[in-house]
């Protein structure tokens, strides 16, 4: 592929990634009217927020000559990253190999396969998540031309959000005359919380930036893996290099069953088909709003859609436990504001989110 062809490919891909709508979700909580703002990241090319970092990491890797045509892309991932690299890698003409723990949903595994990538499933006995990372490094060393995105330590992961998701959120809120009081997001690699958090804090130094993890398996507050949880994509078995807890506010905890019920409600009551971590993010945003006041402007993300969870507990009845927040939430409606970047609907209704229109 010539340099111009490659540049064109990146240009075309960037028209399908980012520029997502910002939702204003209206609900009643314990009798009081509330609003929470959510960046709808399930709108990206492969249905998750990870498309943003995969695109940015690959673009940077080409710029720095860390990858070349023909290099195999090899990554250890719990799912969405694998799907993103499998699709983008294929679009750019690369072979892709993904190492993944074998307890992730069958939809994730099949989606990666559908993009023509090779998938190697690693059991708990073979080392689980950390084992996957070691094996991906070993495979790369055995090949002449390979590229390891290393999402857990690659600063271009959080930079993707610093350069795109953060500014989009800021401008979409500013367009409504709002300044965010807090941003909260579940932590997998930490790219989302660190990148968006850094940008928003530069604009509003008083903002609170809260990471979130499952109360059933709190990796960040303990420093290691404890317990089990069902919020795929967050709280793996260690604290990633990208995560700098001293730059963040307090860690919010959400029960995985509560997150499942919340995600079910968002789909069945509002028609927003999102994954379990999105339900958890919404509840974490509510907890932050309870601390800051019911009128505070709290923002979070819907990291992916519900299609990858059709074989999981998301589709089963979840028992309610004492202390769940989801049971006191009555979802009312939502408004959405699309980012202008690649979409024409803003032109139709005459509003623009104001984000720095970029590539296309
Ligand atoms: N939710 C889901 C569904 C994810 O796949 C991920 C990424 N692992 C996250 C949340 C967390 O995002 P990040 O890696 O940027 O912390």
Image: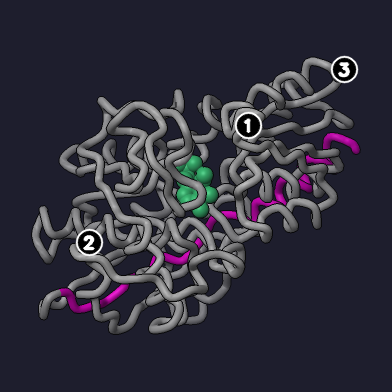
Q: Which residue is mark 3?
A: 144
Q: Which residue is mark 2?
A: 286
Q: Is residue 296 left or right of residue 138?
A: left
Query: Which residue is at 73% across, 29% downward?
Result: 62
Q: Is residue 331 above or below residue 135?
A: below
Task: Answer whether residue 163 is visible to the viewer in this image.
Answer: no
Q: Residue 248 lies in what quarter of the image?
A: top left
Question: Which of the image's four quarters has the C terminus?
Answer: bottom right
Question: Which of the image's four quarters has the N terminus?
Answer: top right
Residue range of the region highlighted in magenta in the rendering: 1-29
Q: Tag 2, which secondary structure? A: helix
Q: Give the number of the mark in front: 2 or 1.
A: 1
Q: CA distance from mark 1 to mark 3?
A: 29 Å
In the rendering, at what x and y percent does residue 317 appear?
A: 43, 75
Question: Which class describes the residues within 10 Å of circle 3: few (<14), some (14-19), or many (20+)?
Answer: few
Front-lying residue, 256 or 98:
256
Does the segment drawn in magenta span residue 27?
yes
The disc placed on residue 64 is none
Q: Which residue is mark 1?
A: 125
């Amino acid at each position: 592929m010539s340099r111009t062809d490659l540049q064109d490919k990146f240009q075309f891909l960037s028209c399908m990634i980012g520029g997502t709508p910002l939702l204003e979700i209206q609900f009643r909580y314990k009798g009081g009217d509330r609003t929470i703002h959510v960046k709808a990241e399930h709108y990206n090319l492969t249905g998750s927020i990870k498309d943003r970092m995969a695109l940015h990491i690959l673009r940077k890797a080409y710029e720095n000559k860390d990858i070349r045509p023909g290099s195999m892309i090899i990554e250890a991932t719990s799912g969405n990253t694998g799907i993103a690299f499998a699709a983008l890698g294929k679009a750019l003409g690369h072979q892709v190999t993904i190492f993944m723990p074998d307890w992730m949903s069958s939809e994730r595994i099949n989606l990666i396969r559908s993009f023509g990538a090779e998938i190697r499933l690693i059991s708990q006995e073979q080392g689980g998540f950390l084992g996957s990372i070691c094996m991906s490094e070993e495979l790369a060393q055995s090949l002449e031309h390979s590229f390891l995105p290393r999402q857990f330590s690659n600063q271009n992961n959080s930079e993707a959000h610093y350069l795109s998701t953060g500014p989009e959120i800021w401008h979409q809120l500013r367009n409504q005359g709002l300044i965010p009081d807090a941003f909260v997001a579940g932590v997998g690699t930490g790219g989302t919380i660190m990148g968006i958090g850094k940008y928003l804090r530069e604009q509003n130094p008083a903002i609170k930036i809260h990471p979130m993890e499952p109360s059933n398996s709190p990796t960040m507050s303990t420093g290691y893996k404890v317990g089990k949880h069902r919020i795929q994509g967050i709280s793996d078995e260690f604290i990633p290099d990208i995560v700098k807890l001293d730059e963040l506010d307090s860690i919010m905890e959400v029960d995985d069953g509560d997150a499942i019920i919340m995600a079910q409600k968002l789909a069945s009551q509002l028609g927003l088909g999102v994954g379990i971590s999105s339900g958890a993010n919404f509840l974490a945003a509510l907890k932050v709003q309870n601390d800051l006041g019911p009128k505070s402007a709290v923002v979070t993300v819907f990291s992916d859609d519900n299609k990858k969870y059709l074989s999981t507990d998301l589709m089963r009845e979840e028992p309610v436990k004492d202390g769940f927040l989801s049971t006191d939430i009555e979802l009312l409606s939502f408004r959405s504001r699309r980012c202008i970047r690649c979409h024409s609907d803003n032109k139709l209704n005459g509003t623009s989110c104001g984000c720095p229109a970029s590539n296309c």
